[in-house]
Image (tube, helix red, strand yellow):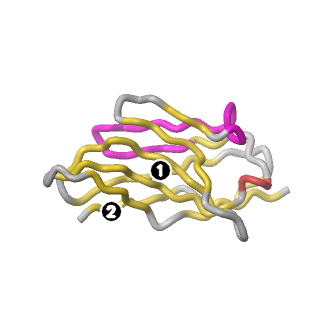
Amino acid sequence: QVQLVESGGGLVQAGGSLRLSCAASGSTFSISSMGWYRQAPGKQRELVATISSGGSTNYADSVKGRFTISSDNAKNTVYLQMNSLKPEDTAVYYCKGILRLSDGFTRHYWGQGTQVTVSS
């Protein structure tokens, strides 16, 4: 069984920075891609950023230039460095992993979410 465990959320003032981490562990797997999504109250979950196993990245327009996604493949961990945070970045941030398991099947996994609150 695979688990994704996030950490690093919290309360920060506008203009500040936070770094989120997400570590995948459990059954034998290889990572196809990992990413961060967020869901604000009353809104749908939306993509923030993704990174492929080869290092290709993709960002939502709203975070380009402020957020950076990176990964440490040896640790099966993905990071999200968030700078110049705005109140509208307030949301629960979820880690998602698209993993290929030893049975050959690719499955999607989600972390439990971590709250990010940006005060004005």
Asked whether, in this view, residue 69 is left or right of residue 38, the answer is: left
In the drawing, what numbered circle is on residue 10? none
Asked whether, in this view, residue 113 is left or right of residue 99, the answer is: right
Look at mark 2 in the image and give the residue it sits on. Answer: 3
Q: Residue at x 36, y 38 (%)?
A: 72
Disc 2 on helix, strand or loop? strand
Question: Is residue 46 located in the magenta-colored stretch of the structure?
Answer: no
Look at mark 1 in the image and give the residue it sits on. Answer: 21
Locate residue 2: give its quadrant: bottom left
Crowd around label 1: few <14 · some 14–19 · many ≥20 (10 Å):
many
Q: Amino acid at mark 2?
A: Gln
* x then y, percent, for residue 50: 50, 41
Front in this rendered view, residue 39 or 24: 39
- Depth check, mark 2 against mark 1: the one in front is 2
Asked whether, in this view, residue 28 is left or right of residue 91, the answer is: left
Q: Is residue 66 above or below residue 111?
A: above
Q: Considering the image in quadrants, where does the N terminus appear? A: bottom left
Q: Amino acid at mark 1?
A: Ser
Q: Which residues are magenta?
A: 61-80
